Each structure stands twice: as structure tokens, then as C-alpha cells.
Image (spheres, coloured by chain):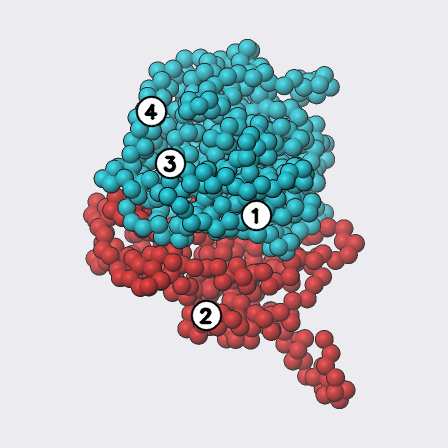
Amino acid sequence: MADAIFEVFRGDREGGQTATYRVPIAPGMVVLDALHHIQGHQAPDLAVRWNCKAGKCGSCSAEVNGRPRLTCKTRMDSLPLDKPITVQPMKSFPVIKDLVTDVSWNYRVNKKIPAFTPKPGTDWKMYQPDVDRVQEFRKCIECFLCQNVCHVLREHDEMEHFGGPRFFVRVAGLEMHPLDSKSRTRLLKEELGIGLCNITKCCTEVCPEEIHITDNAIIPLKERVVDEFYDPLTMLVRKIRGAKSD
Amino acid sequence: MTTEFETHDHDVLIIGAGGAGLRAALEALSQGATVGVVCKSLLGKAHTVMAEGGIAAAMANVDHADDWRTHFRDTMRGGKFLNSWRMAQLHAQEAPDRVRELEQWGALFDRTEDGNILQRAFGGHTFKRLCHVGDRTGLEMIRTLQDRGVQLGIDVFMECTVSRLLKDGDRIAGAFGYWREQGRFVVFRAKSVVMATGGIGKAYKITSNSWEYTGDGMALAYNAGADLMDMEFVQFHPTGMVWPPGVQGLLVTEAVRGEGGILRNKLGERFMEKYDPKRMELSTRDVVARSIYTEVREGRGTEHGGAYLDISHKPAEYVKKKLPSMYHQFKELADVDITAGPMEVGPTCHYMMGGIRVEAETAQASVPGLFAAGEAAAGLHGANRLGGNSLSDLLVFGRRAGFAAAEHARTIQSKPIDSGQVQDGAREMLAPFERKSGENPYTIHRDLQETMQSLVGIFRNKEDLIRGLGELEKLKERAAHMSVEGSRLFNPGWHLAQDLNSMLIVSEAVTRSALAREESRGAHSRIDYPDFDAAWGTKNNVIAREGNAMKLRQSPVPQMPVELKQLVTEEK
């Protein structure tokens, strides 16, 4: 079979450039296979994250021909081979080396989210229809592709004021858990800045788990925030009483 | 030479952040210990995330006749009675509580009609026993444990590799390693260390395991003087993908068979009728793997050298609901629609029954201060593990290891680290950079995988195993001279050089144990000794380091009390 030409970013925090590699194509090959081939035969120090190679762990995110993808699920036969295939690290996170980026910010955001808090005296009975919608959110493999494409993070670098789609999905999984008793709407409004999202659905488009991030997680959460903080009746009551209620 | 390194202090250091490591961390924390968790990948990416089918626990939500005794009996029979009976008993008794605990921490399992945790059938289990979330149970489990850890304020050192254990006299005093990102050295001072490092699959060419599964914990423990046990028992999962080449070995969950999947050869024969007519596709993994292998070897394999596994007789929506990741995996990676036609599957190296020898109650290894849980430890599964018993193993013995490690830490006074050991650790890590024009670790790794796959695989014989040992000697020699290119900054070649050292140790332990056991039992099949041997049924192979040599001895399998013996021999 023919060869494919790869242009892979090589560099670190200081900067870098693309390097060109020629890789023989095998049937069914994915981009991650090609990166492993480059490591094994041409550039043993090429930095790539990966684990399961089956789309279950979310480690191997990168931008292939400009599109954010899991490289383990990007088939070579889905790409045009008459020109070089470019592989770049996720743009929204600082590069550590080559295709490996510093995603530690995500772990810091996660720590802000209060854990599952069951209703007191619960009998732990739950029914599948109630669990279904939460299970969708719990499919998330934390590939951070949604964070990478979200323009609030990608173009506006609002890391300090915005949690990003991944963590709206996580909060949705807790808020809609049939037995959870805690409210996280103030967190959503103030610390995770859900108001900054203007529902362009870029996150939903790239989700490899096909989670309906915008429709099923973000919009219902925005509605909860609105109900709690911007409901006209509540606002009127506050105005008359001149006091803030929480 | 002086080495720069940072130092961290904890009562309990846990190496590995899969199910066992995280469960151990939670328990040690709740006992009041200070806890550090070190993991080679990012948090939440450990192999537990890939577990698909479910957690075995006799909750009797679906089959009300189930109880721990039946689960115990199934586990002992599945393990061909080489298991530690006490571990099997504790496991069966405690697994339901460990699953309930996950639910109380926020896990959302699939439900029964009456609102309880749904359980499915699996190979070797008498009753429907596997608590599950579609075919992504491991993801649910690791995320739940991870979130609980975040809530309790767990200290996690991500993308950090431990390359040696540090000792104070006979006991464990900490660990030395490096940050994968920057390549800087780090010392962890700890009163107890828990090994939760998983298996060894990357020593084989066709495997369902990720790059992390290089037997580190076993090699570290062995180098620190601990016993390894049952190393000949490597589980080949019957159903890995066989085509296309890039996905060869990728796991096809047993849940496909649990949900009614049927195996056929290229002639359309349902061949399990020949090998296990009673249990058919839901026979134990050792039997199904050998059956597929035999069909292929005798010329009845599929186009790409496997068997057909078919679930397409079930309604398409049902398949997509119960096996969503299998549906996507085949559709996206192999252009196969499993709701419309069969998958091609074949055996893949999946799990290590053997590992660090531990005490049943405390998970303590034979070196004071060292504990082990999950796949890194030996004992629970004997000669063959039942599907679903791994996730429950992680929870039951992760918790026990964390508890005992915290308790042990209370009895120890912390002492300064021996800098000589740290300097040795640093020298060893830097050596491949200093050797110029040596071989690259990738080539040696490929040859190791070829050797283990072809000479120490599913079917073994004396001649191959002796040749295997010879090949391993040559590989060790080559590894002693390998060199790496580039800098210490996130350098996978350098990382592999370190992992290769672990793989070579465990591969030798597997081969020596396999050569010694002159019988066939569970996952260990000798062509030259095809039958059970009653005498070998009472012995575990134990590996330990003496000077620089690997020594093998036999240790009697502990005998279970009369009432349990009756239980396992009852005809049911």
C-alpha cells in the first residue's frame, strides 16, 4: 500500500515547528497508529498521550488537519492522502511537548464542584427512565476536546471565569441525579460562568461520545440559573423588600 | 554525582490510580492517614476505565437464589482451586457492600424494573451477577472513585513513574521516580506503600492492555525482595478484535456473550458444543480462548484468523442500548455493524492472575510495609479469573490494602531517606542517555513481544519455554546496552526504556513458572502435559530474587476449612 505524509508539530513551551514523516499505510489504520509508527521507527522521543486506543479513555486528543479529534478514532481512509496530514496539539492548552498539552487547569476546575450529596434517608431505589438522562452525561471520557473548541476558552482565554462544557456536563450529571439534594446553580453562575456560553454547539459537534452537551446539559442548567437568579417575580420581591435572598 | 530531586512525605503512598489504587487511597484517608497517589497517566485514564462488562457481586437483585457461597464456589471452580480460599471468601462476602458504596458515592448503574441495580449473566457465574452500566462499567467506577477522592482532598501525582522502592533495612521506606513531563526526579517518603499497578499485557504482542501495563509493581516488589506467585497464569481473553491490524487485540467485552452472543467457525458450526456443551459461550475464559484458538489452528477460522461472534439476532436497539461502545468500536474501527452481522474475534492477552504474593486479610506482601491489591496482587483468581471478578477484586482488596497500610503506618517512625539508594536510582535512570549508539528500546520491546507471544502464549511446551528463557537472556543483555535519544522532557523512548526493565523481569517470571508447572490448569495449557496433575493442584509457584538471580520454589496451597470444602465439591 501507499505511504502517507505526516506533518507533526515538534516543540515545547518555547515554540517549535512541524516535522515531516513518511508512514506506510495499513488497512484500517488510524492516526494514532501512524504516530506510534513514527515513534517506533523515526522519532523515539515524539511525545504523544494515549492509553486505551479504543476511544474509551480520552487521552489521545489532537488536531488532525485542523479538526480536533481522538487520534485513535481517526481513520486514515477518512482523510485525503494526496496532501500531507497535519497533526497539531490541542490549541486551547499550553504545549508541554509535541502533541502533549498541559490540561491541569481542567483538574483544578473539577475540584470546585461539590460532590454528589444524597437526600437524607434515601432508599436507593432508582428507575431506568430517571437514570437514562444522567447516564448520558456520565459517558464523558474527559478527552477535553469540547474544552478545546469552546471559543470562550479557545479565543478568549476565559480560564479564570469559565468552567467549560466538560464541567457543565459534570454538573448536569450531579444536578439531575435522581437522589442528589445539593444545588449548584450559584456555582454555575458565579464560578463556572455559564452565562458566557452562547450555545454555538461547537462542543457538541466534537464530542466523541455523542453527548448532547448543549441541548441536554448546558441549556437546562442555564434555565436553572435563570429560574433562580433572574425570575421576574423573585426580582420584584427582592426590589420591594430591598433585601437579597439566597 | 549528586542528584537534584524533590521530596514528598506521606503515611501511605499508593502507586497506581485505577480502581484498586483509588479505593485504597479512600480507605487510608478515612483512617486518618496522609495519602499520596502516584500514577503514570492522567487521573482517570487507568485501565479500569476500559473495563466493560460489570462488577461481580452476589446481590441477588435478579436471581434471588444467589448468595456469597455460590459466588465463592464459582470463583474457586473457575480458578481450578489454586486460589487463596480466604481471599475468595472475603471477596464474595464483601463485594455487594463495595458496590452499594459506589452507588452511595454517586455511581449510576443500570436498573431493574423494581429500581435496584441490574445484574447480567457472565461466563462461569451460576447466576446473573454482574452489576453494570451498559458496556462502560469501568468508566463509571473510576469516575465515581475519582470524584470521591477529589471530594476528600486526595493528593495525586499524575504522569509520574516510580522506578524503584526505597528501603530502610528490611522494610519499605518510600519510592524513587521521575515526573514524565519534565523528567525531574522525585522521592516519596512513606511508611507504607500500596502497589496497585495492574498487569503485564504489554509484554505480549496481541493484548487488550494499554502502554501502562508493563508489570511495574511486580518488578518493583520483586526487586525489593517480595515474593511473586502464580506467574504462569496469564489470561487470554477469548474475544479480542482481529481485524484490521491496528486494532488487533482490542477487547470485545464478554457482555456480548452475556447478552446472548453466539460463537461460530467459518463453517457456521456453533463449536462451543464440542468443548463445553453445558455452558457453551458462557464457559470460563480459559476454555473459550482455547476453543477459538483450536478452531483456527485446525483450519476452521475466519478470514482474518478468528471466530465469528454474533449478536445480530437480538433487536438492533437492544444491542445499541446494552453494548453501545462495542457498536461504535466495530462501526468506526472495523466498518462492521454488529446489529446486522457477526464480529471477528480471537484471543488477546488480557489479565494477569499471578502477581505479588499477599496475605488475604491485609493485602500485605512478604516485605514489611509493602501491600498490593488488584491485578498486581496474586491469590484471588487462582489459575483463571472469572469475568467481573476483577472490578470487585479492586474494590474489596483495594479497601483492605488501604486500611492495613494506614494501620501499619501508625506503628512506624519516619526516618531520613538513604541518599545512596536515591543516587543509585538516578544513575540507573540516566544511564540510557549516557550510552551512545546503543539499541533503541522500541526494537527490543517488539522482539520481547514476539518472544512472549510465540513461545509463552496460550499453548506452551517445554521446548518453547526453554527457548523463551534463552531469548529473554539475550533481550536482557540488549536492554543493558540500550540508549535513548533526546532530552528528559516528556520522552516516550526514555519512558519505555524504564518500562522495559519491568517487562523483562515479569516475562522471565512467567516463563520460569510456566516451565516448572508440568500440567495444564486454567489459563496455563501445556501441550506436553495436557491434563490436570493432582500433585500440582496443591502447589503454587513462588518467585523471589536471590542476589541477582531469579529463584523459583513451590509453596503448598492453603487448605480450606471443611465446611467450605463441602461447599465447593457439592454438585450444583
Label 4 CA crowd tier, 10 Å (few <14, some 14–19, many 20+)? some
What residue type is disc 1 on?
A: Asp
Residue drawn 34% across the image and 31% down it: B448
- Mark seen at residue B473: 4
What residue type is disc 3 on?
A: Leu
What residue type is disc 2 on?
A: Leu
In this rendering, would B109 be left or right of A80?
right
Q: Secondary structure at mark 1?
A: strand
| Mark closer to the chain start, 4 or 1 | 1
* Position of residue A177 measured from the top left corner of the image (x, y, whole percent): 66, 58
What residue type is disc 4 on?
A: Glu
The chain shown in red is which? A
* Position of residue B424 measured from the top left corner of the image (x, y, whole percent): 41, 38
Distance from Cα at disc 3 to Cα at disc 2: 39 Å
Distance from Cα at disc 1 to Cα at disc 2: 36 Å
Residue drawn 25% across the image and 37% down it: B438
Q: Quadrant of residue B444?
A: top left
* Position of residue A155 measured from the top left corner of the image (x, y, whole percent): 41, 73
Residue behind mark 2: A153
- Mark seen at residue B517: none
Label 2 CA crowd tier, 10 Å (few <14, some 14–19, many 20+)? many
Residue drawn 26% across the image and 60% down it: A18
Distance from Cα at disc 2 to Cα at disc 4: 53 Å
Residue behind mark 3: B500
